[in-house]
Structure formats: C-alpha cells, structure tokens
Image (cartoon, rainbow, N blue to C red):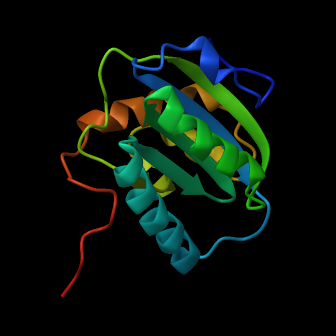
Amino acid sequence: MSFLEDSQINFSSFDPEHLIELSYISKSSKDVGILALMNLLESAVHRNKRSSVTGVLFYDNGVYGQILEGLPGAIQPIWASINADPRHKDIQVLDIDKLPKRRFSNWSMKFYGSEEISKFVPELRMSLKDGVPALPGEILALMRSLANQSTQQDGLPPKHS
C-alpha cells in the first residue's frame, strides 16, 4: 500500500502478531529549533523503547519524515498521537505494509537532518528548500537505506565532553 491520501489507517487489517512499517511526511506547523528537536527525539526514543517500536526520523526546513516499525498495536497509538500533534500539518502517509524483519533494530529512533541526507541524495536539498517535499518517494527510499549507514544503538546524538 503506497502513497495514501488519507491519514486514517485501519490497523485491524494487519495481523496483530506481524511487524508493520509505517512511513509518512508532514510539514511543521511552526519553526522548530534544535532544542525542541532534541526534546522530541528524546521523548520518542523513550516511548518507542517502552513500545518495542524502532525507526528513523528526518527533519529539515519545516519537513518531517519518519518510519516507524513494530507491531500494529504499538504503532497505532503513536500514529494517533502524531495525527493529534499540533506540530504537524499536511500529513501524508507514504507507505504502510507488512515488514518481514526490522530495518532499524538497533534504533529506538534515529534522527537525520538534511546535511547528512544530502550527502546521499543531493537533489533532495533543492526539494526541501521551500519546505515542500517534492520527492516523497526519494525521502522514503533514503530513510529506508539509512538503516545500513549506522549501527548506533539509539537515536540520541553522541554526547560531547
């Protein structure tokens, strides 16, 4: 199931014992600073660990992209929370489907910004310039490919001393 128009998902259509992957993009409803992003990421890491959900989060220039993977019963409340979150607008589901195995098994939530991602897909930088994701398929493919780029155990950035 790809590129859904509607953010309403029937989670009961999935086997409750089978992993699923849900990916989406959205626009930020307001400017997000680095401190707010780090707080959001830290909160997501702890919530996802409790729920056995893994994934990756992308944010740049007012655009969020995220992949969540886990059991449908664990993803559903997170998805409801995202849809109710006033920080998101124009949410577009990219894909939701069964997942044979986790891509991000080591990450409760890994974060990437455009600097890291632009190294892999330079044309993405131009599509995000105006905060309009013109390449949602490329964002999805890139986020999926990031699973091979790192083996970091959690999504928190390394601490500097």
> In percent of the image, x 54 and y 42: which residue is there?
66
> In percent of the image, x 59 and y 36: which residue is there?
76
Which corner quadrant holds the N terminus? top right
Count of numbered badges drawn on the protein: 0
Give the quadrant of residue 55.
Answer: top left
> In percent of the image, x 59 and y 22: which residue is there?
95
> In percent of the image, x 46 and y 23: which residue is there?
20
Q: Report x, y in % for residue 161.
A: 18, 88
Is residue 131 at all visible to an observer of this figure?
no
Closest to the observer, 144 or 153 = 153
Closest to the observer, 146 or 53 = 53
Give the quadrant of residue 159.
Answer: bottom left
Q: Horizontally, is 137 left or right of 130 in the view?
A: left
Q: Horizontally, is 36 left or right of 81 in the view?
A: left
Is residue 138 at all visible to an observer of this figure?
yes
Q: Residue furthest bottom?
A: 161
Q: Report x, y in % for residue 53.
A: 40, 41
Q: Decide: is 13 above or below 135.
A: above
Give the quadrant of residue 71.
Answer: top left
Closest to the observer, 123 or 97 = 97
Q: Decide: is 32 above or below 71.
A: below
Closest to the observer, 101 or 146 = 101
Q: Decide: is 115 above or below 133.
A: below
Q: Report x, y in % for residue 43.
A: 47, 66
Q: Decide: is 80 above or below 50.
A: above
Q: Report x, y in % for residue 130.
A: 75, 52
